Image: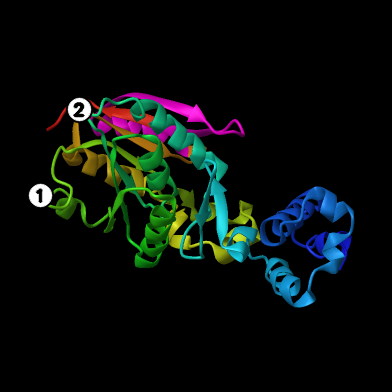
Amino acid sequence: MTYADLWHSLTPLYDAREAQSIVRYVLSERFALSLTDIAGGAAERLADDELRPLMERLQEGEPVQYVLGRAMFCGRTFCVSPAVLIPRPETETLCQWVSEEYSGTLPSQPPRLLDVGTGSGCIAVTLALECQGAEVVALDISADALAVARDNARRLGAQVQFLEADILADADRLCEEGTLGEHTLSAIVSNPPYICQKERALMHANVLGHEPHTALFVPDDDPLLFYRAIARAGRRLLRQGGRLFFEINPIYSDALAAMLSDEGYADTASRPDPFGKTRCMKTTLNTHE
């Protein structure tokens, strides 16, 4: 099949530019073809039994990252599977913010960072590699997700402690000595589920059909469900002056800031993602009760 045949086969699902980008990515990552190779017709010389199964999965709407089993994040290649969300550029903004705060910390005062809902481990692994001297702990409710995260940490040489836990139910256990312990953390970082069920109609079919819904959606009547649970756990887990760093739904940024103030946090600030949307929020624990 020609390059044109390949990308045209995806246009029922994607516009022309995105279809071309997906096919070029597959040809580059799986078959090491450059743009010059593609322009020279190299795609036509690929073995059909190698290329066709990949294209069939793409034509069914499976995200290219799952088809290839990997995704780029903060300049590193992470393995991904349908057990985890695909790392996205918006989340890189969150990691960059945390890294700015903690990458220069003196070794005598090593930060202790917790990633809640780690998924592929992209946040935890990135912070472990970029915040020298930091102790990084990551938790997730999914054993399958943790298996992916552990593999990414191993491959990329990151020291991360992984815990299987549900932040909605296990906060008391996490505060116990030997798990995390009270007032031991410098910061909690999280990209929790934040999409309301009513927003489904606005989402691309390949996300709805393939990415894990437990990592995406919250009830329409409680969009701050996970943020509230993390903020309340943070009052016990964070050191005095500890911080929360969140990826957020821009629709609820004002409500989130108000809730954090009610929960005892101050100096709340936000940052836009690469597309100009308010996507990250930082706040500082004001007092311990």
| Numbered disc 1: secondary structure | loop
Left or right: 276, with 101 as reference point: right
For residue 254, say whether it is visible. Answer: no
Percent across and percent down for residue 125 are: 40, 47
Q: Is residue 264 left or right of residue 86?
A: left
Q: Which quarter shows the C terminus?
A: top left
Res 151 visible: yes
Categorize mark 1 by other alpha carbons within 10 Å: few (<14), some (14-19), many (20+).
few
Question: Going 79% across and 63% down the picture, which residue do you hit?
Answer: 12
Say above or below: 99 vs 194.
above
First-in-chain label (1 vs 2): 2
Amino acid type, residue under disc 1 in the picture: Glu
Crowd class of label 2 (few under 14; some 14 to 19; many from 20; radius 10 Å): few
On residue 143, the disc is none
Choose between 62 and 40: the one closer to the eye.
Answer: 40
- Residue drawn at x 62%, y 51% as measured from the top left: 202
Q: Is residue 255 left or right of residue 199?
A: left
Residue 259: quarter of image: top left
In the picture, the disc for residue 177 is 1
Amino acid of disc 2: Ser
Q: Residue furthest bottom?
A: 49
Is residue 13 depicted above or below 193 in this figure?
A: below
Q: Is residue 73 above or below residue 48?
A: above
Position in image of residue 224 (x %, y %): 37, 44
For label 2, the residue is 108
- Magenta segment boundaries in residue numbering: 252-281
Residue 53 location, x and y as percent?
A: 70, 74
Q: Is 268 inside the magenta-drawn segment?
A: yes
User: Measured along the vertical axis of the image, is residue 164 above or below residue 138?
Assistant: below
- The CA span between labels 1 and 2 is 22 Å
